[in-house]
Image (spheres, helix red, strand yellow):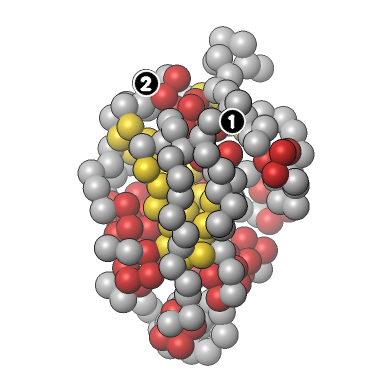
Amino acid sequence: MSGVGAYRAVMFLPVHCVVCRTLGSTLCELCAAQLVPAPEAPPLPPLDRTVALFAYEGVGRTVVSRLKFDGHRDAVRPMGAMLAAAIDAPVDLVTWVPTSPARRRRRGYDQAELLARATARSLGVPVRRTVRRQSGPAQTGQARAARLQASFSPFGRPPHGVVAVVDDVRTTGASLVGVARALRFCGARSVVGATLAATAGTTSGSASYSAIDPLQSG
């Protein structure tokens, strides 16, 4: 089931539309109809596949912005259910691409973590943090070359089986690839990347991403 199509399979509580603010649902029918299907992603090894609900443009961009910057957390649960429907495959564990500590403090939450927890709840599987972000500037607003340097190291218990990595937007794919490499390094058999939105700028997985050896990380 496609990400946009999955929307119609999810029931919502009577709240404000995350885009136009009208009462009735988290995403009203009028705004949902304006979502653009996510562009196809090229292979992004070591990810086995990626899924996204919609393109990061127009209404789709507003949905992400309201969740990420405006604290519209009532959208998290239904969006997580949509992501679970889009994954549409057995998963053993759900995790997320962690934001920087500074951004988490400023916003008061990590939107990717909230989405991951909602997705895991819908899938009926465990959810936990599995990687930590290496120090460096936030990726928002960074040039493509800077985004390709996303680096993560394993954190906590080693994951096994199939792991779904959740984030809000897939742009170059660097963050998803960086997390996937760290997960593969410590034992994950398969990794799926799942995001709310995706841009057409996703690159191939051939760039020099690297997982940090946990014995070398601080």
* Earlier residue among tags 1 and 2: 2
Q: In this view, does 126 lie to the left or right of 77?
A: left
Amino acid beneath label 1: Ala
Do callouts 1 and 2 mark residues in contact (Cβ within 8 Å)? no
The image quadrant of residue 185 is top left
Q: How crowded is mark 2: few (under 14 residues within 10 Å), some or many (20 or more)?
A: few
Percent position of residue 2, x then y: 33, 64
Quadrant in the rendering for residue 46: top left
Asked if residue 112 shows in the view, the reply is no
Outermost left residue = 90
Q: In which quarter of the image is the C terminus?
A: top right
Q: Mark 2 points at which residue?
A: 187
Q: Quadrant of the N terminus?
A: bottom left
Residue at which label 1 appears: 207
Q: Where does residue 186 sit, x and y in percent of width and height?
A: 42, 19
- Residue at the spot 75% in from the left edge and 47% down from the top edge: 142
